[in-house]
Structures are given as structure tokens and as C-alpha cells.
Image (cartoon, rainbow, N blue to C red):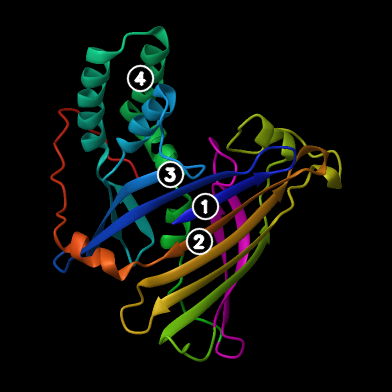
Amino acid sequence: MNIEFNEDGKEKQSLRFDLEVLAKKNDENKTWLFQFDRRNVFINLKKPDTIADKLAYECGQVIYPLQIEVTNNWSKRTIKSRPLAIEKLKKLEEKIKMTYKSSHIDTYFLKTWETVNNPASFVKAVEQNMFLSFFFAPLYQQYNTLTNIVENTLPIPIIPFCKAISYNVKQKVLPKYTRFNTITVVQKGMIEDKRSIKDLENKFDEPIFKKESEADNLLGELNAKYELHKETRVIQSLTVDASIKLKDNKTKSFNMQVYYLSERDKIANQSVFHQIPILKKETNVE
């Protein structure tokens, strides 16, 4: 998977990594459990090398493997692996502080603990995962029999550290299989979010600042193309381009390219679902 981030006036940033996805169905209660594990991360085409970069990477990795349970015909998702993230962060902090001692490291762990210990903050951190927005997109729906198009809303975390931006998306399944025996699904959308540019500048999740003119409206586009396996409907490839207009008409955008790597199947076949420890005082959060 490769994601490139662009913003007018700033240097392009890139993120590349492998993401292993395991799925397990529970026929008894009709749920699916997915486990996502991130590996081989490259930031701007290189592995994290400085102490600060390594610390940021290791703290970000504690949420993996990430387990998400899907119920109610894919309409409800629950993150199950926060207790595992807490356990991993404890071990990481002990390990790092045995080698390094600084106020910067203390502050970084303090902020990470604030995220991991708070169920709502943890959910918000997980929602920053760009790929999950598309992996859990409602692809399998009743399409209009005449146009083969369905319309829905897709939340995309194009602005970090605040609630994802809502794009109104028209989604279409192309009528013929490709020469690779895949099903093609295309999405075209425009931003349909009630917040203003000033709301996003302040990282507000809800509209607070009144829109004084059309210039305060959020504008942006989204184009995505899925190739799904003809029989299993597993994503074989996904390409996405999305943008948003910000202050002074500057554009922020990203391009994401995802490809299924069949040679990684041998590794996935050796992988297991991690056991999730039980917290003494745990609150279920959806």
C-alpha cells in the first residue's frame, strides 16, 4: 500500500507499508472479526531512522494488530483490541525508558497513553486509518436496476486529528468482468460536510463557526476504483484520489494505491488471531 499526501506550499509526504488482513466468521452470532496488522513501514521512502521517528513509529504501532468486529449486516463495527494496545504500550514504555531518558520521551508517552486509555480517543485514532474508510465502505448494496448506481456517504480522514470529512458518493458496478476476472466498482463524490474551513482549522468535529459566505463552504472531490475478486469479492486493487480546498483556496489531497500481493498468502497462512486480554474495568465503545 502506498499513500502520497500533497498540500499546496508544502513538500510531498509518502507512506508505504504492507497490511495483512485476516478474517474470521462466527456463524453462531453472525459476526465477522477482522484483524489488521501493519508491517514494513517506509516514511518518505525510508524506514524511520532518528530516535524521534522511531519513537513515533513504535507508539503508532501499538494499535496493531487491530481487531474490529462487524455485525448487523456490516452496519455496526466495534474495535475489540484496545486492551492489547494497552498491554503493548506498557511493554514499549518499559523498554524505551530503560535505554533513553528525556522529557520529550515522557511527554510523547503521556500523549499516547491519553489516546490509548480513553476508549473514545482510541476509536478516533483508529479512524485516522485511510484504508479502513474504503475497506468498510458499503460496496455490497441494492443498486438501481436502471442505472446500476447507488448513492451513499463516505467519511474520509483527509484532515488529521479531527472527525473524517463526509463525501457524498455515487457508486457504480461496471457491467462486465475485466480480463483479470475481477469486478470493477467506481466511486465519484463531492464533499458534503456541514463544517466550515474555520472549523477544520480548529480541529472541530462539529460545525461551530457560522458560514458567512460561499467561500466558507468545504469543497473537494473523490474518485476511487476497486477491483474485486469475481467470487470472493476480496479487494484485488484499490486506487483513490481525493482533495479538499482549504484557506486561501489551497488544496490538500492524497493518492492511495493498494494491491493484493498473492505471494504474501504464505505469511498470512502462518498468522493467528491475537488473544485479547481482559481489562478489569472496560467500557464497550462502538
Give the spatial CA distance, label 2 vs label 3.
15 Å
Asked whether the beta carbons under mark 2 and mark 4 sit within 8 Å of each other, the answer is: no
Query: Tag 4: Cα neighbours inside 10 Å, few (<14), some, or many (≥20)?
Result: some
Q: Which quarter of the figure is the N terminus placed in?
A: bottom left
Q: Which quarter of the figure is the C terminus placed in?
A: top left
| Earlier residue among tags 4 and 1 | 1
Per the image, the residue denoted by label 4 is 109
Per the image, the residue denoted by label 2 is 257
> Of discs 1 and 3, which sits in the foreground?
3
Q: Secondary structure at mark 4?
A: helix
Give the spatial CA distance, label 1 vs label 3.
11 Å
| Earlier residue among tags 2 and 3 | 3
Q: Secondary structure at mark 2?
A: strand
- Name the kind of residue labelled 2 in the image: Gln
Residue span colored magenta:
145-173
Give the spatial CA distance, label 2 vs label 1.
6 Å
Per the image, the residue denoted by label 1 is 3
Query: Tag 2: Cα neighbours inside 10 Å, few (<14), some, or many (≥20)?
Result: some
Residue lying at 48% horizontally and 54% vertically, measured from the top left: 2
Residue 73 in the image: state x and y as whole percent.
33, 67
Asked whether the beta carbons under mark 1 and mark 3 sit within 8 Å of each other, the answer is: no
Instruction: Relative to 76, say whether 201 is above or below.
Output: above
